[in-house]
Image (tube, rainbow, N blue to C red):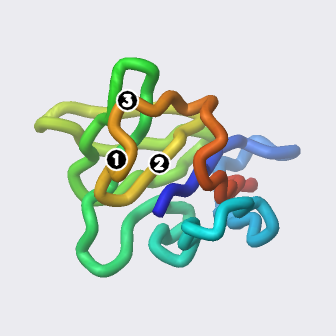
Amino acid sequence: PDAYATCSTGPSSGGCTSVEPDANACGSASCDETQLNTGASETSCKNGETLYVRTPDGNIKIDGKLICNGGTWTGTKNGGVFTATSVSATCNAPCNGVTPTDEVCPTSGTCNS
């Protein structure tokens, strides 16, 4: 199950207060957008799955979840800090080596102020 979520400051500058998933963005029969939590200004996986962020160089394992605040996703990777304004996230990384621009089950969400 793949999902895509962006974090943006929106029209105001008060930071993100909500993450809105787009239920119509899933164009694949194999897509299960319910596996990814995009509520309460966070991106996380349900059912104990591991969250990964896709990059052109491969998947980055995220420890726990990503929090959206002030237009930036923030999380922990390998004991370090991960930050990004937009992420392509997946649970349990079913597609290694897929770039964020690939249209693989795009379930989008926007973090709004």
- Give the mark nearer the N terminus: 3 vs 2: 2
The image position of residue 93, as x and y in percent, is: 33, 50
What is the three-letter code of the residue carrying label 1? Tyr
- Secondary structure category for the residue under label 3: loop
- Give the mark nearer the N terminus: 1 vs 2: 1
The reply to whether residue 39 is visible in this rendering is no
The reply to whether residue 88 is visible in this rendering is yes
Q: What residue is rendered at 50% in x and 28% in y?
A: 99
What is the three-letter code of the residue carrying label 2? Ala
- Front residue of this view, candidates 55 and 30: 30
Q: What residue is rendered at 71% in x and 53% in y?
A: 110
Asked whether disc 1 touches disc 2, contact meaning CB atoms under 8 Å apart, the reply is yes
Number of numbered discs overlaid on the protein picture: 3
What is the three-letter code of the residue carrying label 3? Gly
Q: Which numbered disc, 3 or 2, marks the residue closer to the eye? A: 3
The image position of residue 94, as x and y in percent, is: 35, 52
Q: Which residue is mark 1?
A: 52
Q: Which residue is mark 3?
A: 97
Mark identifier at residue 89: 2
Asked whether disc 3 touches disc 1, contact meaning CB atoms under 8 Å apart, the reply is no
Q: Residues within 10 Å of mark 3 (few under 14, many from 20)?
A: few
Q: CA distance from mark 3 to mark 2?
A: 13 Å
- Secondary structure category for the residue under label 2: strand
- Give the mark nearer the N terminus: 3 vs 1: 1
The image position of residue 35, as x and y in percent, is: 46, 73
In this view, the residue farthest toward the front is 29
The image position of residue 64, as x and y in percent, is: 26, 59
- Secondary structure category for the residue under label 1: strand
Asked whether disc 3 touches disc 2, contact meaning CB atoms under 8 Å apart, the reply is no
